[in-house]
Amino acid sequence: MTQVSARLASLSPSATLAMSQKSGELKAQGVDVINLSVGEPDFNTPEPIKEAAKKAIDENYSRYSPVAGYPALRNAIVAKLKNENGLEYTANQISCANGAKQSVCNTIMVLVNPGDEVIIPAPFWVSYPEMVKLAEGTPVIVAAGIEQDFKITPAQLEAAITPKTKALILCSPSNPTGSVYSAEELAGLAEVLKKHPEIIVIADEIYEHINYIGKHNSIAQIDGMKDRTVIVNGVSKAYAMTGWRIGFIAGPEWIVKAVNKLQGQYTSGPCSVSQKAAEAAYTGSQAPVEEMRQAFERRRNLIVSLAKEVPGFEVNQPEGAFYLFPKCSYYYGKTDGTRTIENADDLAMYLLEVGHVACVGGTSFGAPECIRMSYATSDENIVEAIKRIKEALAALK
């Protein structure tokens, strides 16, 4: 038997992972590829965090942890949420998982029934709609173009709500656009949601600390929203710990209990050593986080200024994360004589094969007129990558 389940057959493969794999294959063949497709910091995990992991190994943290994570880690997250975000939670309202990705999926799986609708602003992270489909729900895509800085309006949200709406997924700072919702913009969305108290907000805040506006704003901070918001966060981006696989949710206890029940049946608690490293990340010095944020801001400024010089690119100013999401539909229908660019995926493949720069087409992000470029790389790579892109695009007529 070779027939996979209908559940799996309904899913699309991850475009970001596919492009990263293609880039790796070319590199293995000796091609000098600059990879702007990967969504992870290029820094190493700070030394005190690594030392905490080594200490945990020596102290034999090698057994199963509680499903929701060690109490010490959950209490460290409680303290982080209070001190940094002004939000009061208990350890029973925290559940740790194998990365923020699992935290998002856990939440969707415990909330969404077949036929339920989940509102997803576009551009979106590629996995959101697929997770909703995995739960047999219906993704409801609400498009926000570059002219509105890739952020949906209260009127758009209101128009998307139906009696079947179960949840809204809100990612700020955003992957793939770097857009950040201001406190005022979040308040506008909250006013709409207050008229629909049955809707849960899944607030993906994994890029919280990589923002260039001075302060992170969470929709959970707005009066009346905390008890119907599930915050998703983790250590991967802020602390350069992508491979450690620690994420968490903070939310209403009834949702957290449901997530623990689900997780207890298919992964149990996350890696014990990684949990002790994450605890050290939250309780230790935050200076490395700020150092990395400053580097990302410098790179943001560099890539925006250079990308604005690329003919045919329409570029906005991202306020967080480490992505640029230029509109590039100017090149659709153009050809270099051997191939014609029909869409963003064609353009991304062209830039990889001709310019030797790996980007990701915007189709899988719900924005087929754009491409995503990660600037989680060196200044030198950014300069060279934009130079190659300009040269490659110049051949398209």
Image (cartoon, helix red, strand yellow):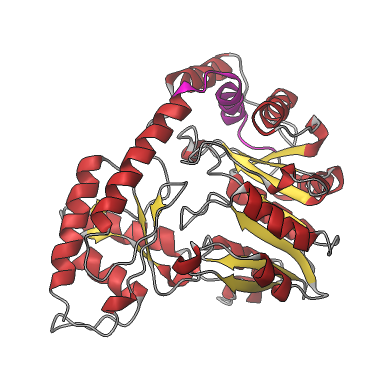
The residue lying at 40 percent from left, 52 percent from top is 323
Give the quarter of the image for residue 98: top right
274 in magenta: yes
The location of residue 260, given as percent across then percent down, is: 78, 44
Give the quarter of the image for residue 296: top left
The residue lying at 43 percent from left, 20 percent from top is 47
Instruction: Quadrant for the N terminus, please.
Output: bottom right
Q: Is residue 29 visible?
A: no
Nearer the observer, 301 or 355: 301
Q: Residue furthest front?
A: 184
Q: Magenta segment, principal secondary structure?
A: helix
157 in magenta: no
Residue 291 relative to residue 395: left or right: right
Instruction: Quadrant for the C terminus, please.
Output: bottom left
The location of residue 224, given as percent across then percent down, is: 83, 48
Q: Is residue 192 visible?
A: yes
Q: Is residue 304 above or below residue 80?
A: below
The residue lying at 24 percent from left, 64 percent from top is 352
Residue 397 relative to residue 203: left or right: left
The location of residue 287, given as percent across then percent down, is: 47, 22
The location of residue 275, given as percent across then percent down, is: 61, 29
Nearer the observer, 3 or 61: 61
Nearer the observer, 97 or 352: 352
Labels in figure, total: 0
Highlighted range, magenta: 269-287
Residue 316 relative to residue 85: left or right: left
Q: Is residue 372 above or below residue 297?
A: below
Residue 315 relative to residue 191: left or right: left
